[in-house]
């Protein structure tokens, strides 16, 4: 079963997403990660903007972030789409196209 973690970019410390509306979103992230064969997904809280969570899929930290409102407002209907975009960013990076991204 994939692990879903939240970490602070500033010091690497782990924290829990305990917002009541986050449970459904986290369940959808878990399902998505399992379906896409990721052992872990990490959301890194930006050191300068606490509302940004940078996405890490497996071993790859990406230049893609998800707003914290996805979790705090329980936006479970959009999280899979956002993770698909993140996976696309990962594939672009692996293919060497990240240098063309802004």
Image (tube, rainbow, N blue to C red):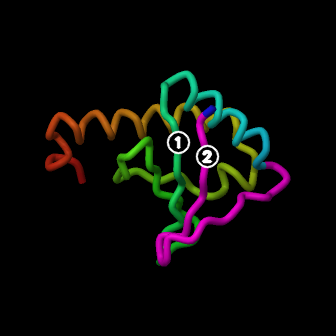
Q: Main secondary structure of the magenta part?
A: loop
Q: Does the magenta portion include 8?
A: yes
Residues in magenta, as a range = 2-21
What percent of the width, then of the height, locates residue 8?
54, 70
User: How far across and down, in percent of the image, does residue 46 sit?
Assistant: 49, 69
Residue 94 in the image: x percent, y percent?
22, 37
Question: In the orientation shown, which residue stands out farthest toward the top?
Answer: 35
Q: Is residue 73 left or right of residue 56?
A: right
Q: Residue furthest right?
A: 20
- Rendered image: mark on residue 40: 1
Residue 37 lies, in percent from the top left, at: 49, 26
Does 54 lie within the magenta span?
no
* Secondary structure at numbered mark 1: strand
**Which dot marks residue 4?**
2
Q: What label sits on residue 85 in the rendered view?
A: none
Question: What residue is rendered at 15% in x and 46% in y?
Answer: 100
Q: Earlier in the sequence, mark 2 or mark 1?
A: 2
Mark 2 surroundings within 10 Å by alpha-carbon count, few (fewer than 14), some (14 through 19), many (20 or more): some
Could you say whether the residue bearing mark 2 is in a helix, strand or loop?
Answer: strand
The quadrant the N terminus occupies is top right
- Tags 2 and 1 touching, CB below 8 Å: yes
Would you call the spot at circle 1 few (<14 residues within 10 Å), some (14-19), or many (20 or more)? some
**Residue pictured at 51% horizontal, 61% vertical:** 44
Q: In the rendered view, does 100 fall on the left or right side of 13?
A: left
């Amino acid at each position: 079963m994939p692990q879903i973690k939240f970490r602070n970019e500033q010091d690497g410390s782990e924290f829990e997403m305990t917002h009541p509306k986050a449970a459904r979103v986290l369940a959808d992230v878990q399902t998505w990660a399992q379906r896409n064969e990721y052992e872990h997904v990490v959301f890194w809280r930006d050191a300068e903007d606490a509302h940004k969570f940078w996405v890490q899929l497996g071993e790859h930290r990406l230049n893609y972030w998800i707003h914290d409102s996805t979790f705090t407002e329980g936006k479970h209907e959009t999280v899979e789409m956002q993770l698909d975009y993140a996976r696309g960013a990962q594939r672009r990076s692996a293919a060497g196209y990240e240098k063309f991204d802004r």
